[in-house]
Image: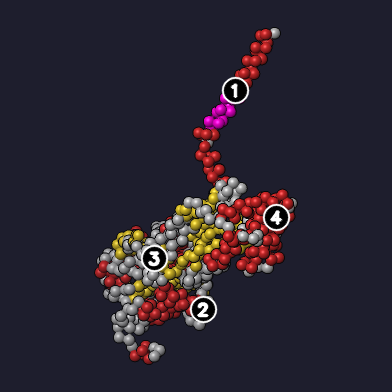
Amino acid sequence: MLRTFQSRALILCLILVAGLSVLSWRLIQIQLVERNRYAESAKKTYRRLEKLPALRGMIVDRNEEVVAKSFPVSSLMVDKDHLLDPKVVARGLAYEEASKQPGWAELDEDARRKRVNATRGEILRRDSEQAIVQKHLAYAISVLARPLGMRREDLRAAIENSRGKYFAIAKDLPGDVADRLREAIESSGIEGFDWQNSLKRWYPAPTMATHLIGFTGEREEKNDEGKPVPKMVGVFGVESTMESYLSGRDGWREHRRDVRGMLIPGDAGSLMPPRPGLNVQLTLDMGVQAIVEEEIDAAMKEYQGQKAAVVIMDPKTGGILAMASRPHFDLNRREHIAETGFNFALQAIYEPGSTFKIVSSSGALNENLVTPQTTIFCHNGLYEEGPIKVPDHHPYGSLTVEGILQKSSNIGAYKLARQLGMDRFYQYVSRFGFGKKTGIQLLGESGGLVRNSGNPVDFSRASYGYAVSVTPLQVARAYCAIANGGELLRPRIVNALVANDGTEVERFPPEVLGRVMRPDTAKKMRAALEKVVEKQGTAPLAAVPGYRVAGKTGTAKKHNPNGRGYLDGRYTVSFAGMMPADDPAFVAVVVIDDPQTTKVSRYGGTIAAPAFGKMAARIATAMNLKPTEPVPATARSTEAP
């Protein structure tokens, strides 16, 4: 009997010891192991962090003209967890009642808080939970409706009919409107409303350089209370590629709560100021860009083009002075982006046609196989050898190398390429940068399509711009190599990163990727391309009175996207030019896809060349280029007085 009692007592003691040991271990775990987690949890209970968004850096052009900037906005949020909690909203009603009692104005903050808390207790004892919530909602609506510019019934419906528990009742409020609402909320003591601070991106010239500048969007993040807050991020163009520099670092302000979970008026807690983003200075010249935008729109209208692109580059630095693609969109509205967001200038690939003849001609000159005056027999319009068949648009007999470019002879270009040989020809294609991305600081660039198949027919067609695919940007860069003395440059769109105080943080210098040809070869090519713009050439409409212009036309049949072969009567027309020819200040490429006009023949020389000529004349004025030639009397007589 005694032994049984002792056994039971021992078991009971062991159970008590085990239970107390577990409890002790749990206390140790809470105090030592998990103290940080519980401290953070308690901290969240008695504080709220208000996000202070960093001001996103501006984007400016080379002349400091602003093309993208941000300004702070606020959204008034409804928090139904608080708005429908009678213990929370009772304080708002208490504030209303207490503030109407005699002597309120003479009380200090501590005395006011005590009176509000006492009145809150009375309300909770006096009224039902549902009555408290409804009275407070009516009170809040009476305070907010007028500053929000809403009718009371509309505001009530917006709050009551929303299925969300945390949502915006007014978005993107400018500072003055938000300040009036903040003051109304604070002075009335209403509860259940919160603020989200954010930024609004604004583009002063929203239809210019749209594909290059790009735009921002919102990414949803969670704050320390688990509520969704918007974060501005770049999603397209320079806004996207320079995101890490533009975005800055968000800050925060801490608001403390009392034991009842109410915000303590006048107690701001700790503060982490936001750090603004850096300003991005582009190589873009918005004056030149405006000219390009106007002229490409005029050309699209006149020639009924379906798509188009213009690229203007500084051949000495690789800087993009202007870039426009059609169709385009409004950066502030961003409507129909799926149809208009395609950047034709660096994403579209097309067979370039005769603008590609610079490869065989410059290669042959650079290898000393020919001189500009070397004569080439062009077979009177048709060259045939086995499976190879090269036609010309006009029967030519013998042409000089300069004449091959001037008349745009396919046969002449092929015979120059044949002197180079297939392997060496494709080496020059690669030297010019075709078949690979240029490395511009924009996403989505196409590398084009160049393939040395070893097939003689493909080789013959590539010599005059078929069986290869390029982008307008690649063509512009290739012609820059001729303009600058033979160097291949990486296209640049960013000049520098600049802090808000004007300090230059980083500069992006020109980058030479390789040498395409000798300087003397480039000079010979410029002279040869000048003849293209003469009356006997294919592009007299590209001429600009008072300046020597060099360039090349391109006309290529459109490939059938649904099968093999080409579409009848459908073309991609282009012109690549530079001015002044002896020392070019800019290179311009104009590409118009599938013009439908019947007013003129659909060639590069009749559509793209005159568009270039009009742009170039205006750009020369904008850049203050000195005339290099006497202006003919006929040209002077047509000028406006």
Residue located at (65% from left, 51% from top): 118
Which comes sooner in the sequence, label 2 or label 4? Answer: 4
* Residue stretch in magenta: 18-29
Residue located at (68% from left, 58% from top): 136
Which comes sooner in the sequence, label 4 or label 1? Answer: 1
Q: In front here: 528 or 178? A: 178
| Quadrant (top left, top right, bottom left, bottom right) of the C terminus | bottom left
Numbered circle sitting on residue 281: 3
Is residue 217 depicted above or below 289 in this figure? Answer: above
**Which residue is disc 1 drawn over?**
18
Q: Is residue 555 left or right of residue 180?
A: left
Q: CA separation, marks 2 and 1?
A: 89 Å
Q: CA separation, marks 3 and 2?
A: 32 Å
Q: Secondary structure at mark 3?
A: strand
**Which residue is disc 2 drawn over?**
301
Local crowd at mark 1 within 10 Å, few (<14), some, or many (≥20)? Answer: few
Q: Which one is in front in this view, the residue at disc 4 or the one at disc 3? A: 4
Q: In front here: 368 or 482? A: 482
Q: CA separation, marks 1 and 3?
A: 71 Å
- Measured from the top left, where is residue 433 in percent x and y? 37, 62
Q: Which one is in front in this view, the residue at disc 1 or the one at disc 3? A: 1
Which comes sooner in the sequence, label 3 or label 2? Answer: 3
Numbered circle sitting on residue 425: none
Tell me if label 4 and label 3 are in contact, CB under 8 Å: no
Q: Which one is in front in this view, the residue at disc 2 or the one at disc 1? A: 1
